[in-house]
Amino acid sequence: MNRTEENVAMTSEDLNWWPVGRLPRTEAAGKVARHPELAEFLRAHPAHAEYDEIWPLRTPVPLHGRLGFSDELPPVQFRSSIQGIVVRADRKVLFLWPATPSGNFSHLIVGGRPEGDETPEETLIREVGEESGWRVRPVALLGYRYFLHLGPLTDEMADRPYPEFLQPVYAAVAEAYDPALLLPGENPCEFVDAAWAERVTQVDHRPLLIAALLAAGLG
């Protein structure tokens, strides 16, 4: 999957700086889930980070985001993709766009949409292979990334649940590199030292990274 449509949110509020602009932090307050079933899931699994951002599609898409822990999958009808934090036994983590770290959680995850009757774990294995060339073993469901649209539905977002959607986040361990898995045109990612990845990630976006290292026995 090419991830150009949902990349990292910049710490700068300059919306002309590709790939994603940040809205002022004060705008994130008071956003609540609209569907009762989803609202119940979020109440049971409180967020440790909330933020607003803009995805820079042909029509920019403003979204309210949350990150939280959960050991249960969110309701399937609200899932848009499966994401994973991929770690290696030498305590390195797969990092998206390492040359331009922004502090946002999006640098730490790789994943994509399910195909056919795939389980979430099968989706993650295939997507990480296609985007990075690494064969991985999912080890734990960590939590979720949630988004609520702050504007009308656009054509480019019409294949996702509206007005809100979630992405389950797993921890996965990289086991072997196989370049035959890699699809052309994917965004750059590489393994970096986990301590560096934590240091360049904003504080309230770090907990799922720390949890992934613990789940892999690398805490």
Image (spheres, rainbow, N blue to C red):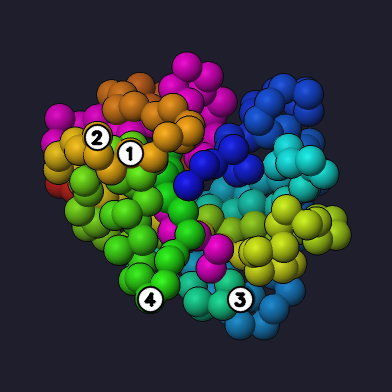
Identify which residue is drawn at 57% across, 48% down.
49
CA gap, disc 4 and disc 3: 23 Å
Q: Residues within 10 Å of mark 3 (few under 14, many from 20)?
A: many
- The picture places residue 23, in percent across and down from the top left corner, at 77, 38
> Which mark's residue is nearer the viewer, 4 or 3?
4
Q: Residues within 10 Å of mark 1 (few under 14, many from 20)?
A: some
- In the picture of the structure, the residue carrying the numbered disc 4 is 117
Judged from this view, the residue extending furthest toward the bottom is: 36
- The picture places residue 75, in percent across and down from the top left corner, at 51, 78
The magenta segment: 79-107
Q: Is mark 1 in CB contact (under 8 Å) with mark 2?
A: yes
215 lies above or below 179: below
Identify which residue is drawn at 20% across, 32% down.
91
Q: Is residue 91 visible?
A: yes
CA gap, disc 1 and disc 3: 34 Å
Q: Secondary structure at mark 1?
A: loop
- In the picture of the structure, the residue carrying the numbered disc 1 is 182
Q: Quadrant of residue 195?
A: top left
Q: Secondary structure at mark 2?
A: helix
- In the picture of the structure, the residue carrying the numbered disc 3 is 38
Q: Residues within 10 Å of mark 2 (few under 14, many from 20)?
A: few
> Which amino acid type is marked by label 2?
Pro
Q: Residues within 10 Å of mark 4 (few under 14, many from 20)?
A: few
Left or right of 219? Residue 112 is: right
